[in-house]
Image: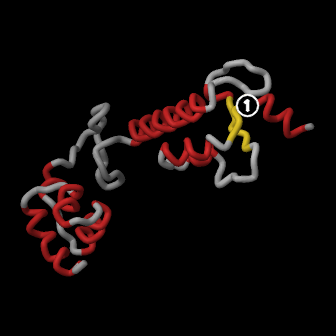
Amino acid sequence: MNYEALKSRLPQLAEEGLTYQQMGDVLGVSSAWVHKWMNRMNIKSHYSLNNSLSECKDCGAELDKTILKGNRCMKCRYKDTANRRKDKRKAAVELLGDVCKDCGVSYPHAVYDFHHHTEEKDECVSVMIHSGRKLEDILNEASKCELLCSNCHRMRHFT
């Protein structure tokens, strides 16, 4: 692929007001590639110039653009991240039956631990959830686990 030719088309696409994703689709590259070269070539797109909000799009709080990029305040960003993590954890718990394997009691999702019962452990499921991994990867790793409440999990490792 001739990347120099693609880079030469970026100013024209930016002038048309396309988003990074749209530019990537036109050029056949990722939006991350477009973003990297737009920054390196110091090209500002009309889309980013015209759609940069001075207030948070969720709560309306005033944004300090010297600190934050994007159109959301830190509180709304954290809230959204927390909700995404809860949804991923809920999906992993529901995949495993939403009941402790040892005591047979159903608890709130936050009480459960993912216990790897084999040596095929790639990564800890809760770490994967916290680090923002794809749901597909999380569910794949969770399928190698048993669902235990935190008390039963500690008892298993104690004995």
User: At 30% from the left edge and 33% from the top edge, which residue is drawn?
Assistant: 58
Is residue 29 visible in the rendered image? The answer is yes
Indicate whether 53 appears above or below 43: above
Indicate whether 14 appears above or below 156: below
Which x, y percent locates residue 89?
56, 35
User: At 68% from the left edge and 23% from the top edge, which residue is drawn?
Assistant: 99
Tell whether 22 sits left or right of 103: left
Which x, y percent locates residue 35?
27, 64
Colour scheme employed for the rendering of this structure = secondary structure
Which x, y percent locates residue 22?
18, 56
Give the residue number, with chain letter if any, for mark 1: 148
Tell whether 28 sits left or right of 109: left
Q: Residue furthest right?
A: 159
90, 56: nearer the viewer: 90
Indicate whether 24 appears above or below 106: below
Is residue 126 visible in the rendered image? The answer is no
The amino acid type, in three-letter code, at marker 1 is Leu
The kind of secondary structure element at disc 1 is strand
20, 58: nearer the viewer: 20
Where, quadrant-wise, is the C terminus in this rendering? top right
Place residue 101 in its image quadrant: top right
Place residue 31 in its image quadrant: bottom left
Indicate whether 147 appears above or below 135: above
User: At 15% from the left edge and 53% from the top edge, which residue is drawn?
Assistant: 47
Which x, y percent locates residue 38?
23, 68
Disc 1 crowd, CA 10 A, few/some/many (<14, 14-19, 20+):
many
User: At 69% from the left edge and 52% from the top edge, which residue is drawn?
Assistant: 121
